[in-house]
Structures are given as structure tokens and as C-alpha cells.
Image (cartoon, grey):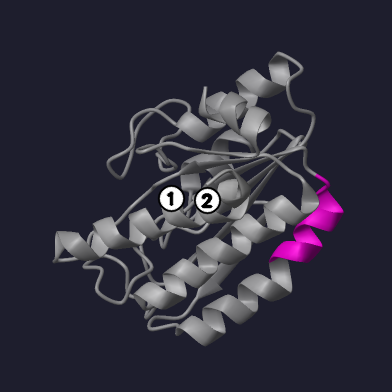
Amino acid sequence: ECALYAQQYGVAMNVAGGTHHSFAGHGEGFCVFNDVCIASNLLLNRGQAKKILVIDLDVHQGNGNASIMANEPRVFVFSMHGEKNYPFRKQVSDLDIELDNDTSDAEYLQILEDTLPRLIAEVAPDMIFYQSAVDVLATDKLGKLGLTQAGCKARDEYVLQQAKAANIPIAIVMGGGYSEDIEDVVEAHCNTFRLAQQIFFEEFV
């Protein structure tokens, strides 16, 4: 339903989801049911999408996504994640970018800006699923990267603007976030919602 709302309105947000460690036959890493892969297959099988781009910016590789979609050419899985983090035995996505510990806002955003426009042009998706996890924050207990709140917000803003500019529906799932102070997690997730409102619906406010 989130994907269908995205197709109707340009963007839609799932207040949970992003269970990208779940494989076809077993669960891992707090994930039992792989929502993005199930939704992708439903859209494709029902003829509601022809080419799907998964943008997974969780700090942990979406190994379940990579495994389930390994032989599905209509779904391109892009995962940008910490190299020295779970899962320690990684799967092969269509594109994996592995980041060093303590990667800064500037370095992270530069890599994203160098990658995403090219991917959108080459893959030419008619649907995007975006895993907007906030475990990239420096405050995250399980993250190991160095992003600030501002950097995490700039990441989301860039992804949303790219989707809007290309007129591609984008369905957003939350993924991980494990900062010691729950307010850090909530604020970062709320920024994603605020940006979606501003970028896609500002003229209606």
C-alpha cells in the first residue's frame, strides 16, 4: 500500500519497515519478513512497475535484499554501508559501496552525489524504494559512521530531490536507528518526514 500511495502522490512513508536482512528462507538481524522485496515482487507480478531501484542507505548491508533479488534483473539493489559492520559475510548487490568507519558528512554526501544520478539514469526505474535508516549517525551504538543530524538530513534531502526531479515515485521505509538517546533517532526520522512534506507537498501547505 505504501508503494501504491507513492505512485499516486509521488512519495509515501512507512513508519516501520526496511527489514532488509530477511532472506527468502530465514530471518536475520531483527528481520523476519522482507517488506521491500515482497512489495517489489507484487508490483512486478501485477504489472504495476517494470523496473525498480532499491536505494539502501542503512549502515548495514541489505544482505537479504541482495540474496532475494540476485536473479531478478528488473530490480536493481544499491547498498551503501559500513565495510566493517554487520553482516560480516556480505552478499553481492547490484552495486555495493563500502564505507570506512567514521566516514564524515562531506565524504558520505560526495559519494552519494557521484553515484545516485548516474544510477537513476542507467537503471531508468519507474519505482524507487528508499531505506532511510538513521543508524548512519555518529551517535549510533551499532553504526560506526560519523554523520551528524545535518548530514543525515542532507542525505535524505538529496535522495528525495533526485526522485522528484526524475518524476519517479519513491516509497520510504525507516530501517535501523540505535542511538543511545532515543531523541536522536526520533529527530532524524522526523527530518525524513518533514523533507518529504516540503519537497513533494509544499505547494499544498
Residue at numbered disc 2: 196
The kind of secondary structure element at disc 2 is: helix
Q: Which residues are magenta?
A: 116-124
Query: Was residue 123 drawn as part of the magenta stretch in this picture?
Result: yes
The kind of secondary structure element at disc 1 is: helix
Q: Is residue 153 above or below residue 21?
A: below
Could you tell me which residue is drawn at 38 percent across and 48 percent down? 175
Could you tell me which residue is drawn at 79 percent across and 52 percent down? 166
List x then y, in percent, for residue 40: 62, 29
List x then y, in percent, for residue 87: 39, 56
Q: Nearer the viewer, residue 151 or 72?
A: 151
138 left or right, relative to 154: left
Q: Nearer the viewer, residue 115 or 127?
A: 127
List x then y, in percent, for residue 189: 35, 55
Which label sits on residue 193? 1
The residue under label 1 is which amino acid type? Phe
Q: Within 10 angstroms of label 1, few (less than 14), some, or many (20 or more) residues?
A: some
List x then y, in percent, for residue 78: 63, 54
Q: Within 10 angstroms of label 2, few (less than 14), some, or many (20 or more) residues?
A: many
Query: Was residue 194 drawn as part of the magenta stretch in this picture?
Result: no
Q: Is residue 154 above or below residue 101?
A: above
150 left or right, relative to 66: left
Q: CA distance from mark 2 to mark 1?
A: 5 Å
Could you tell me which residue is drawn at 57 percent across and 34 percent down? 68
The residue under label 2 is which amino acid type? Ala
Residue 180 falls in which quadrant of the image? bottom left
Q: Nearer the viewer, residue 132 or 79?
A: 132
Query: Which residue is at the far top?
Result: 46
Disc 2 to disc 1: CB gap under 8 Å: yes
151 left or right, relative to 74: left
